[in-house]
Image (cartoon, grey):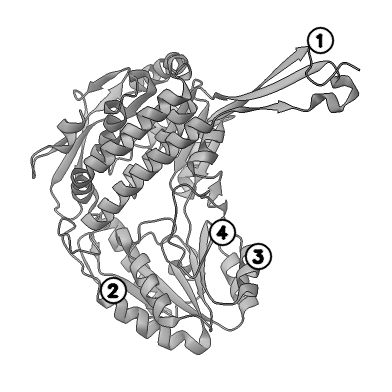
Amino acid sequence: MLSAILDTPSGAVVAAPSLLAGKWISDGPAAERVGPFSRTVVSRARVAQTADVRLAAEYARTGARTIARLAPATRATVLERAAALATDRREEFARLIARELGKPLKDGRGELDRVADTFTVCAAEARQIGGDLLPVAGWARGVGTTALTYRAPAGVALAITPFNAPANLLAHKLGASFAAGNSTVVKAPPQAPAVSAAVVALLRQAGAPEESVQLLHGGGEVGAALCAAAEVSVISFTGSAETGAAVARAAGAKRLVLELGGNAATIVCEDADLAEAATVCARTGYTNSGQSCISVQRVYVHRDRFDAFVEKLSAEVALLKVGDPLDPATDVGSMVDEQAAARVLGWAAEAVDGGARITVGGTRNGATLAPTVVAGPRADDDVVTREVFGALVAVLPYDSFDEVVQTCNRSRFGLQAGIFTRDIGRILTAWRDLEVGGLVVNGSSNFRLDHVPFGGVKDSGFGRESPRCMVEDYTVIKTLLVRGLSIWGEN
């Protein structure tokens, strides 16, 4: 199936089948995905029906027993093969991502490099799954008893993935779940059905048993039905805060890992290398057209250096090549659809009405928004308070370090932040006081290593997305108590 998806002739519609109860299925009601740059149909996905949800849940519950019996070494070997396959098919994946989502080839290639890394790290974590020998004989009632624990598979995991990094974020969820020994049901984003199907097919081609994964396509109603299924033990969701709340309501009393986005801030202190900070913010503020939960959105610059930074940032942004995502030289392709681009441009116009100025960009062609810098918006403008998730960076002045930390913390989000400074005191203060899950020093908010814990606080969700943390979320601790037999002594 992997070849059938990735080797579809250029310009032809890619079939994105469901994988249900061990069978790839293309027949039935379908939804078409129109490429945001080409404005032509790129892929066609089979939409799940009510009966499909019930069958997937029941099959996963039964299949979970099979996957749980696989030795961790066996799971790790499959994941290592998947990593190698991701590297081998890097170019085909990148082209499919460009067609379905308008993401430039260079970004798609980078995403596949991360997929390979993610599967490799998941393999390593599978080999580390173990347990503990507990010191129960340290208390009188524990004398004469031996107690041990091990991490057992949770059973059935549900992975609900977003469109902005459809290959790597699925690799995180699916790879960690398989490493933990679960059967996984994937609900793909409607905007990236073929990419999602290709990742699932890649794991199957690497040797994962048919019971290990199923794939369903559809909208929120399919996701809600899967969340409510009693067979599901743990849910990992990446998306908006509003949808995350709906997931939690539908799930009820289930274990949840929610990564819900943000409006990331980057602080540029007066001692920063201004040229370096401007270059980094320009390069990381518009990758994937800014459609990343940690993309540079709010840049706070000390007032003494504000004008100089805006000038340098605007000059760097103006150098970005905008155009066809299939052109290897393109830096910025299209956003996910025209509505998203129009929304971001509308927010920029509202900021200008309030006294801000657009120093570069501020135009769009269909779903392609020219990289835009908004200088000096008001603190309550949408480009500051809401998640832009688009090709726009807002720059604001600040007067004191304590003030800017408080300003950053007024956001309802708290995923990740960046800071440019050489002052170790400010670094430690920001690490302690910023209400975020992660801080990047001498870099923007938009930097992530896939083996490092990643996640947020407040409306940015809870739980951490790295293979080690996710394996813990996808497993349960089982305890063994042996009475009348102890390695610790009897008296």
Residue designated by label 2: 362
- Mark nearer the viewer, 3 or 1: 1
**C-alpha separation, residue under disc 4 versus residue under disc 3:** 15 Å
Identify the residue shown where x is 53% and y is 48%: 453
For marks 4 and 3 on the same chain, the one whose residue lies earlier in the sequence: 4
Identify the residue shown where x is 46% and y is 36%: 124
Residue designated by label 3: 433
The quadrant the C terminus occupies is top right
Q: Few, some or many C-alpha atoms within 10 Å of disc 3 (few <14, some 14-19, many ≥20)?
A: few
Contact (Cβ within 8 Å) of mark 3 with mark 1: no
The answer to whether 60 appears left or right of 491 in the picture is left
- Name the spot of residue 423 as percent of width and height, x first: 60, 77
Q: Few, some or many C-alpha atoms within 10 Å of disc 1 (few <14, some 14-19, many ≥20)?
A: few
For marks 2 and 4 on the same chain, the one whose residue lies earlier in the sequence: 2
Identify the residue shown where x is 32% and y is 38%: 83
Which label is found at residue 484? Answer: 1
**C-alpha separation, residue under disc 3 versus residue under disc 1:** 51 Å
SS at mark 3?
A: helix
For marks 2 and 1 on the same chain, the one whose residue lies earlier in the sequence: 2
The amino acid type, in three-letter code, at marker 2 is Gly
SS at mark 1?
A: loop
SS at mark 2?
A: loop
**C-alpha separation, residue under disc 2 versus residue under disc 1:** 75 Å
Residue designated by label 4: 412
For marks 3 and 2 on the same chain, the one whose residue lies earlier in the sequence: 2
Relative to 428, residue 35 above or below: above
- Name the spot of residue 221 as percent of width and height, x first: 38, 33
The amino acid type, in three-letter code, at marker 3 is Asp
The answer, for residue 458, to whether it is visible in the render is: no
SS at mark 4?
A: loop
Relative to 209, residue 321 above or below: below
- Name the spot of residue 110 as percent of width and height, x first: 30, 53
